[in-house]
Image (tube, rainbow, N blue to C red):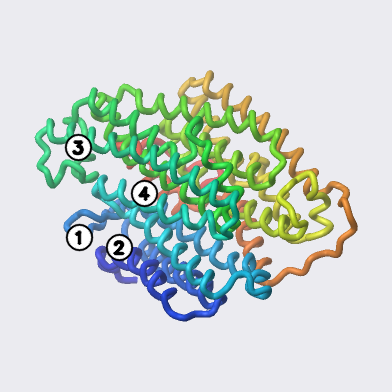
Amino acid sequence: MSALPGELIIYALLFIPLAGVLACCLPLSARAGLRTSAAVAVCESAIVTAAFLTRPLSHRIFALDNILFLDTLSLYHVALVTLVFLASSFYSLTFFKDGIERGTFTPQRARRFAMIWNGFFAALIGVLCANNLGLLWICLETTTLVSALLIMTDGQRASIEAMWKYLLLCSVGIAFAFVGTLLLSVAARNASFSPQESLLWTALYERAGLLDGRIMCAAFIFILVGFGTKAGLAPMHTWLPDAHSQAPTPVSAVFSGVMLSCALYCIMRYLPLCEAAMGMTGKAHAMLVVFGLFSILVAAVFIPAQKNIKRFLAYSSVEHIGIIALGLGLGGLGTFAALFHTFNHSVSKMLAFFSAGRLAHRFGTYDMTAIKGAVTTDPLWGSAFFTAVIALIGVAPFSIFMSEFQLVKASVDTARFAPLAVFLFGAIVVFVSALRHAIAVSFGSPLSPAKAREWSIRDAIIVAGCGCLMLACGLFVPRWYVAVLTNASNIVEGAGHLWDATGGNFR
């Protein structure tokens, strides 16, 4: 296959979701509006696949006078965002089906939802394609403004309250990130970078050692707190349980599956710059370890007491974002594990939210004390929920077990036994608590007899697809995927070849 022009790939990735926004301005039916989002995600998937097949991993592509670019790290996250939007768009057709039939989800509401949904998609792609760090900040702020409207889709008081809490806290976080961006610009100007280069990531990356270490240390603190708020790192996570519990289920899946990861992606871009400026002292990595471990412990405290099924999954996201931050903080194999865990968490959490949404609709409540015997009442989605939860808590042979095992190995290899002990303690508490919730929901005695719910072929494909991905990456990881992860990890580390990841189950 001949290589596609680099600029064409970037423009197509950005244009397709924007075209979806424009398409939703047409007088479409409710189902047609939702199908527009699915068509956008299918087209985006084709572009991402073509980009992987036609471009060498080590090759960067640029557009718009180097303001936009793609490398392996960004393309990996673009693929992940596209996968989650693809599955969530098709799931939306199932989720809103009853509302469409009852007439409560009108064509106007459907078009408005699809328009905002595709705008959110475009903003996330903009974050990942931005070479200019100022543009990256603008795109991430745009995701906050746009996604806030998705939380209040049903217009209920609780969802409006959750939207304002999300908007307020994330905007404060983004303000911190803005200060960090300004400090980076000051450090670049002091190091004689030209005004055109002072915020270009590629230019800064190549000469990061020239930046002032003290300014960059302060910049990273603001960046970590700012983007960490959007990522859901504790203690800046307080918006997350409310937003996840009140948003429509497809929106919750996208929030947890990729929006949090995109905020962490922004931190990944700053990590090598700050470490190089500070002389590779490991201060930035240490900050990530602290925030990561604290997030894991916060999740371990709150998960046992949860009654709402979506709040339970929201706190699970806090734990897994903490695990990814911990891996980034450990560096080396830990960075590889963090990027691998990003994919594993997105797929598992996507399936967990999908199944939680369908079970809540089936039982008429999100209260887990009232959702019992789900496997009997709704065999497809009940089994999917149990499978997703045991995958999320790291049961073998699912893929999260493998990425967490790599994180443990990274801790042992670098003799970081104190962080390892805290991680294992938190993981064990979450394991026991989450398993207790999953068993009660899936196999408990139903409070009232109920007829098994029918399911569609589309539902079965979504469940089977997510399940196969979780199993496949736990049992067998192909060499091309290892190459992608290794190349992306080396970008985050700001170094050359870090380790040999071709042994074990990697083929």
The CA span between labels 1 and 3 is: 21 Å
In the picture of the structure, the residue carrying the numbered disc 4 is 140
Res 185 label = 3
The CA span between labels 4 and 3 is: 18 Å
- Disc nearer the start of the sequence (2/4): 2
Res 64 label = 1
Q: Which residue is drawn at 68% across and 66% down?
A: 460
Query: Residue extending furthest right?
Result: 449
The CA span between labels 3 and 2 is: 25 Å
Within-10-Å neighbours for mark 4: few <14, some 14–19, many 20+:
many
Q: Is residue 94 visible to the viewer in this orientation of the structure?
A: yes
- Disc nearer the start of the sequence (1/3): 1
Give the label, 2 or 4, closer to the camera: 4
Q: What element carries label 2?
A: helix
Give the label, 1 or 3, closer to the camera: 3
Callout 3 amino acid: Ser
Q: Which residue is drawn at 49% across and 80% down?
A: 28
Q: Residue at x 41, y 75 (%)?
A: 25
In the picture of the structure, the residue carrying the numbered disc 2 is 10
Within-10-Å neighbours for mark 2: few <14, some 14–19, many 20+:
many
- Disc nearer the start of the sequence (4/1): 1
Viewer-proximal residue, 279 or 268?
268
Please say if the residues under marks 4 and 3 sit with CB atoms less than 8 Å apart.
no
